[in-house]
Amino acid sequence: MGYSRDIMNRFLFPVAVLTVLAFSSCDRTRNQKGYEYFPDMAHSLAFETYTPNKVFANGMTEQMPVAGTIPRGIIPYQYPATPEGRTLAGKELVCTLEVNQQNLDRGKAEFTIFCIGCHGPAGDGKGHLFTSGKFTMQPASLINERMTIAPIGEIFHVITLGWNTMGAHGPQIRPDDRWRIAMYVKNELQKKTN
């Protein structure tokens, strides 16, 4: 009996200590997590995006991307914003998207967001910004004879880099959506005038 009591004491003491440790380090509440063994690994010491930062020479946390960085999935546009670049883009660029109702609907939605204010719902250059007098120069008509015979690549080029007073929309609209807008102009707006 004395021998088994000694074994029990040897066994119970470590179990009791482990039980006390386990319960003292458990999650008592959602705000008090108990004991953390490596708090610097559990809680990041990261800087907030717009806060000052002594690590960088310019003192800002948010940094510009490294020069020449290209976003994943984006191919740099290779045509210049010149009349020659526009003509070359019209000859070489080909829309690989299928002309279907889904793409035309998406093109119309993007046209409504980005183009309708200047070019108008019919694409005739009589958008709200011109008719209200906010723009003194009338935007280009997308349904005139010159635009009707222009290849779809030229429309994509102009959306990407802009033309005359129109600003570049390449940074705002993803390439596939620029093609959908051009497709909508070619297959919906220009067809209505013919």
Image: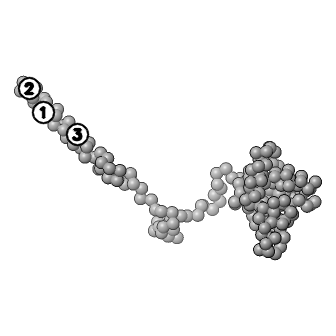
Q: Which residue is mark 1?
A: 9
Q: Position of residue 89 (x, y in %)?
A: 83, 56
Residue type highlighted by circle 3:
Thr
Using the rendered image of the protein, determine whether residue 92 is visible from the camera's viewpoint.
no
Residue 114 appears anywhere in the view: yes
Mark 2–mark 1 Cα distance, whole angstroms, equals: 10 Å
Callout 2, which amino acid?
Tyr
Callout 2 secondary element = helix
Residue 143 percent across, percent down from the top left? 88, 59
Looking at the figure, which quarter contains the N terminus?
top left
Task: Give the residue at x 74% y 50%.
Answer: 106
Tell me where residue 101 appears, x and y as whole percent: 79, 45
First in sequence: mark 2 vs mark 3 = 2
Q: Helix, strand or loop at disc 1?
A: helix
Q: 146 or 80: which is nearer to us?
A: 146
Which residue is tagged 2?
Answer: 3
Its colouring scheme is one colour
Q: Quadrant of residue 166?
A: bottom right
Which residue type carries mark 1?
Asn
Q: Position of residue 153 (x, y in %)?
A: 83, 54
Mark-to-mark CA distance, 2 and 3: 25 Å
Residue 19's label in the rendered image is: 3
Residue at 85% from the left image edge and 50% from the top image edge: 187
Q: Which sits earlier in the primary sequence, circle 3 or circle 1?
A: 1
Is residue 130 shown above or below 88? below
Q: What whole-number distance in Å separates the C-alpha atoms at marks 3 and 1?
A: 15 Å
Q: Farthest residue toward the left?
A: 2
- In front: mark 2 or mark 3? 3
Disc 2 or 1, which lies upstream in sequence? 2
**5 above or below 50?**
above
In the rendered view, does 53 fall on the left or right side of 88?
left
**Drawn side of residue 156 relative to residue 44, left or right:** right
